[in-house]
Image (spheres, rainbow, N blue to C red):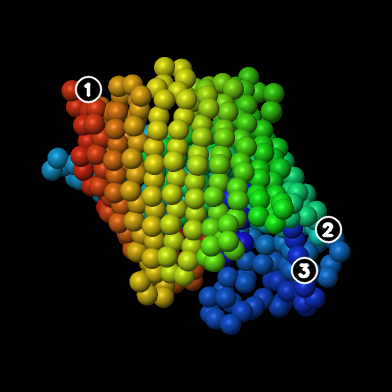
Amino acid sequence: MRKELLYLALLGSGTTLSYAQVPASGLVTGNTYIGDTTYDKIWSLATLYKDENNPILQEFALQGRAHLQWAEVNESGHHYDIDDMDAGANDEKYLGDDVEVRRARFGFKSKWYNQYKLEGQFDLDPNFDYDGTGPDILPGFAKQIYDLYLTYAPSDAFNLSIGKTKTKFTREQEISSKEILTFERSLLANALFPGELTGIWVNGKGIAENWLYEFGIYSNERASGFTSLSSDNGEIILAKIGYDYSQAVGWDSAVVGLHLMHNTDPGAASGNGNGSSGSRTSPKFSNSVSLNNDIVQGRFGLTTEMLWADGDVGQSDVFGISIIPSYFIYDGLQVVGRLQYASSSRANGLSLPGRYEAVIPGDDKGDNYLSGYLGLNYYLYGHKLKLMTGIEYSAMDGNGPSGDFDGYTAFAGMRFFF
């Protein structure tokens, strides 16, 4: 991954917009087939307009993603596939009995006046029959506004954004689902994730050449549309600082980061009112900390992270680590591993990952969680079109009559975005 992509993932949104003197292009200009390969030409169709010499509108393009996957859980000799998981708590859609539409999003991105960026995406129902309380702008089609925000970016050192966005606490959550190397993020990265929230945030890079930062305040209410920062559910306050030491060690990229998140109302529930897309509870932690490191050198990559969170609302403190190495064994073919461990300070302070393992009937609580993942990713057009397969072994020690889990989850899928 190039250093610029690492910066984008760490800081979340916005970089200074740069321009070259090139002819106008895009679907509306008729100059669409840009690039050397067939993939380049196909993907260029998403750019409706691009003219870096236009003082008002520099670019307007469509964006979207589709993630399709199959999964099967094997625990104590019992098999559970996607069809069984359809009865679970996940608000997902399925194609037939075997394929999950893990994500389906569509939206736009644009650049204005050389210093502004406006972009947004909707979470879509691929069967066009969503019957929830989604936004009125796309009834029956969109489950929610995934993100929609405006960024003012006069320089690399200062980007100011306002709107709704994914709240990117932890390194794994910073990396977009378009580019994560495993099918799912680790247990604690998901457990501490506050969701897509309305807020205001500022970030920048290149401070004294090597420093990066981010600070944001968000409404602690997950909703299908926008919410007010004065919501009764309190606020999420997120602060990050990072340091790029790649030049010092001579690697392609190397960034260390520290994230601090404070929740003023842990465990707050968002009901069905005010455009909410179902009842969701804010993480039951007052303070959360992530110390992470991300390096790339040649074909090798390594992401490491240590997490700790201060439990509240009857929730015990939790601690965890994750280690994600990767290596390109051939051009386009990458082997990926992950080792993760999580523990709680009191009995049954952890919950099994809800998407797969917790679908199995029984007690899903425990004290210690250990997981190992091994997968292969094949890149047809970088992260824009890739095939993935993987298998994960996980074990949870619990104190209930059926609290132990010891099993495997197998995955296969395709991921696409433009």
- Residue 147 coordinates in the image, percent (x, y): 62, 45
* Amino acid on which disc 2 is placed: Tyr
Marks 3 and 2, Cα distance to the nearest angstrom? 11 Å
Q: Which residue is mark 2?
A: 113
Q: Residue 229 placed where, x, y %?
A: 69, 28
Q: Is residue 239 visible?
A: yes
Of the pair 147 and 176, the residue shown nearer to us = 176
- Residue at label 1? 400
From mark 1 to mark 2, how far is it between C-alphas? 60 Å
- Mark 3 surroundings within 10 Å by alpha-carbon count, few (fewer than 14), some (14 through 19), many (20 or more): few
Q: Circle 3 sits in a helix, a strand or a loop, which is it?
A: loop
Callout 2: few (<14), some (14-19), or many (20+) C-alpha neighbours within 10 Å?
few
Q: Nearer the viewer, mark 3 or mark 2?
A: 3
Name the foreground residue: 289 vs 72.
289
- Residue placed at 54% from the left, 50% from the top? 256
Q: Which residue is mark 3?
A: 19
Q: Classify mark 1: residues with Cα within 10 Å, few (<14), some (14-19) or many (20+).
A: some
Q: Residue furthest right?
A: 55
Question: Which secondary structure, mark 1?
Answer: loop
Question: Could you tell me which secondary element the residue under label 2 belongs to?
Answer: loop
Q: Of label 1 and label 2, which has the lower sequence position?
A: 2
Q: Residue at x 75, y 61 (%)?
A: 17
Q: Residue furthest left?
A: 77
Amino acid marked by disc 1? Gly
What residue type is disc 3 on?
Tyr
- Do callouts 1 and 3 mark residues in contact (Cβ within 8 Å)? no
Q: Position of residue 206 (x, y in %)?
A: 70, 55
Asked if the residues shown at circle 1 and circle 2 are in contact, with their CB atoms under 8 angstroms apart, the answer is no
Q: Which mark is residue 200?
A: none
Judge from the rendering whether residue 207 lies leftward or rightward of residue 398; answer left or right: right
Whether residue 140 is visible to the viewer of this picture, yes or no, is: no
